[in-house]
Amino acid sequence: MAALPHQKYSLRSQEYVPKWHRPSHYTCVTCSATTSTKPKSGSPNTGRLIIEPQLVTSPMVTPTSATGTLLSDPSLQSTWTHRAWVASGCITVAIALAKSMVAAATSHVWLEPMLAGYIGYILADLGSGVYHWGIDNYGDASTSLFGSQIDAFQGHHKWPWTITRRQFANNLHALARATTFTVLPLDILSDDASFNGFVSVCAGCIMFSQQFHAWAHGTKSKLPPLVVALQDAGVLVSRAQHAAHHRPPYNNNYCIVSGIWNRFLDEQKVQINIAILLDQVLW
């Protein structure tokens, strides 16, 4: 995971609020004073210093005012490198799925590969929550290996609406690259229907979890009807469930595939208990 010395808060606190959740928009009021060197004749204030306060208010920066800038931000645009990684990730996942289906058809055994795929789907949600928790709370942009992911996720908590402005390949390329390097060797080495079924579904859900995450921030009227139906059915993480992740105390609902693990992890305070354990072991 990320380098622990960069942690932003005490692990022993059970109700922590990371600094990127603290209010970041303020109205600045500047007070200026002017003096008059020419006293008015007959005035009782002749010879006195006259101070005239003036309030100058700077405009508040809001998500709406920032939208125009974000749309033209190059960091939100997809590059051909991004698209190439997403394509390679999709190809490796498709190969695993195809090999699973061919092996199942040859052996006439479909139940085991289907169950293996379902287990992959369930565990992908758990994995997304653990990873999301880790990079939300540890490290920064300078952390080796995971720095760019940490910076993106922690920045997302300052400006959560920006994920809906990211282009598709820009949003998925980091996970697609990891998927390619992980799944490709398995494609070459394994011909087992159940194993490949598990790998294809689990890796595919993890790779597309950032897109599921983006949809969870979308407006219902702007989302495809199929996506809304899957969210409402609990197949994909819902908008309402993920919205709770961006409300105080900001330490719950980390899973972003289906969200099926969120209730259990939050009720058992799994993330907090892991943090306390790490604190005891490392410090």
Image: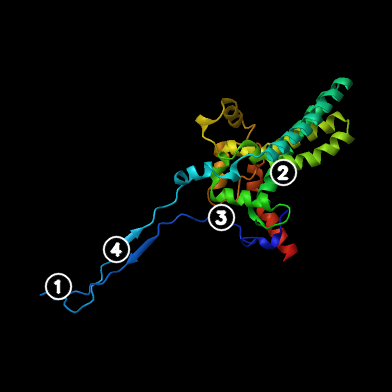
Viewer-side label of 3, 1: 1
Q: Which amino acid does the dot numbered 2 rest on?
A: Gly
Task: Name the residue located 58 percent from the left edge and 51 percent from the top edge.
Answer: 155
Contact, CB < 8 Å: mark 2 with mark 1? no
Task: Give the label, 2 or 3, closer to the camera.
Answer: 3
Residue 55 x/y as whole percent = 31, 61
| Residue 59: image location, x then y, percent | 39, 53
CA gap, disc 2 to disc 4?
Answer: 56 Å
Which label belongs to residue 40?
Answer: 1
Label located before the other in sequence (2 or 4): 4
SS class of the residue under badge 4? strand
Label 3: element kind: helix
**Residue shown at 16% from the left, 77% from the top:** 46
* Mark 2 and mark 1: Cα distance apart in space: 77 Å
Q: Name the residue under label 4.
A: 54
- Which of the pair 37/259 is nearer the observer? 37
Q: What residue type is labelled 3?
A: Trp
- Which of disc 1 and disc 2 is earlier in sequence? 1
Q: Which residue was labeled with disc 2?
A: 127
**Kind of residue indicated by mark 1:** Lys
| Sequence-first disc among 3 and 1 | 3
Pointer 4: residues within 10 angstroms few (<14), some, or many (20+)?
A: few
- Number of the front mark, 2 or 1: 1
- Corner quadrant of residue 33: bottom left
Work out whether mark 1 precedes mark 4 in sequence or the reverse, and give the earlier one: 1
Q: Is 222 rendered above or below residue 43?
A: above
Q: In this view, does 248 lie to the left or right of 210?
A: left
